[in-house]
Image (tube, rainbow, N blue to C red):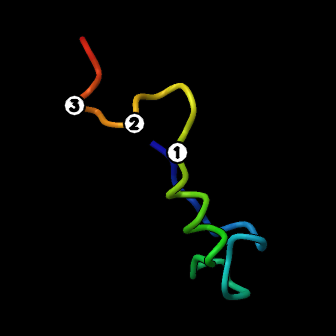
Amino acid sequence: MFFLNRLKPEYSRDADGRMPSDKFVAECTRPVSGFPAKVNDAKV
């Protein structure tokens, strides 16, 4: 488990690092390589 004190300045909308920026949201919604597109499509 990870705990964050604040977001990096380039991913933050405010000086305290608590409000995510549009860049943060874009990074969180992009596909990650090495993982299936859908969890249901993965064969176990």
Image quadrant occupied by the C terminus:
top left
Asked if the residue under mark 2 is in contact with the one under mark 1, i.e. CB atoms within 8 Å, the reply is yes
- Label 1 vs label 2: CA separation? 7 Å
Image side of residue 42 versus residue 11, left or right: left
Towards the viewer: 11 or 34 = 34
Asked if the residue under mark 2 is in contact with the one under mark 3, i.e. CB atoms within 8 Å, the reply is no
Towards the viewer: 14 or 37 = 37
Image side of residue 44 versus residue 32, left or right: left
In the rendered image, which residue does mark 1 sit on? 31
Tell me the element at label 2.
loop
Question: Would you place residue 38 above or below residue 25 in this image?
Answer: above
Q: Amino acid at mark 1?
A: Pro
Within 10 Å of the Cα at label 3, are there few (<14), some (14-19), or many (20+) other Cα atoms?
few
Asked if the residue under mark 1 is in contact with the one under mark 3, i.e. CB atoms within 8 Å, the reply is no
Looking at the picture, how far across and down is residue 12, in whole percent?
A: 68, 77
Within 10 Å of the Cα at label 1, are there few (<14), some (14-19), or many (20+) other Cα atoms?
few
- Label 3 vs label 2: CA separation? 9 Å
Q: Earlier in the sequence, mark 3 or mark 1?
A: 1
Q: Amino acid at mark 3?
A: Asn
Looking at the picture, how far across and down is residue 5, in whole percent?
A: 61, 65
Q: Residue at x 66, y 70 (%)?
A: 23
In the rendered image, which residue does mark 2 sit on? 37
Image side of residue 12 versus residue 32, left or right: right
Q: Earlier in the sequence, mark 1 or mark 2?
A: 1
**In the rendering, which numbered label is found on residue 40?**
3
Looking at the picture, how far across and down is residue 37, in whole percent?
A: 39, 36
Q: Amino acid at mark 2?
A: Ala
